[in-house]
Amino acid sequence: MALQDKYINPFTDFGFKKLFETAEIAKFTPDERTKYEESLKYYRDLKNVVDTSFDEGREEGKMEGKIEGKIEGKMEIARQMKAEGEPVDKISRFTGLTMEEIEKL
C-alpha cells in the first residue's frame, strides 16, 4: 500500500472512488490482474517518456535562449562600435560576427 493511500479520507468523493477501484481490482482473476498490471506498467513507462521529453525540451529551449542572447549581445556591441566609426574588420575580430552581418546593421 502506497504512503498516500494510507491518508485518503474514505468519506470524500475521491476516497470512495479509490476504495471502489481497490475493491474492483481485488476481484480480478489472476489473468485479469496480470493484464491490469501490464497496462499500468505500459502507462507509467509512456508517462515517463513524455515527462522526460518535456524536461529535455525545456532544457533545450533554455540553451537556445542563452545562445540567442549571446548573439544579440554581440550584435549590440557591433552596432555601438559601428556607430563610433570603428572599422568593420576590427568589429568582426572583437565580436566574431561576419563582415556581411556587420554591414547589415
Image (cartoon, rainbow, N blue to C red):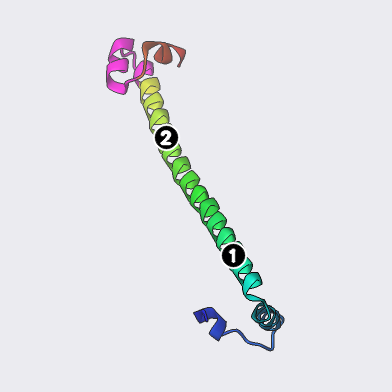
> As drawn, is 83 to the left or to the right of 24?
left
The mark nearer the N terminus, 1 or 2, is 1
- Residue 94 among those drawn in magenta: yes
Residue bounds of the magenta highlight: 81-96
Q: Which mark is residue 40?
A: 1
Pair 1/2: label in front: 1
Residue 34, by quadrant, is bottom right
Instruction: Give the amino acid at mark 2.
Output: Gly
- Residue 92 among those drawn in magenta: yes
> As drawn, is 60 to the left or to the right of 31?
left
> As drawn, is 93 to the left or to the right of 67?
left
Q: Which residue is mark 2?
A: 69
Decide if residue 39 is in sight here.
yes
Residue 25 vs residue 34, the one in the foreground: 34
Instruction: Give the amino acid at mark 1.
Output: Leu
Say if 42 sits above or below 100 in the image: below
Q: Position of residue 102 (x, y in %)?
A: 40, 15
Residue 51 vs residue 82, the one in the foreground: 51
Label 2: which secondary element: helix
Q: Main secondary structure of the magenta part?
A: helix
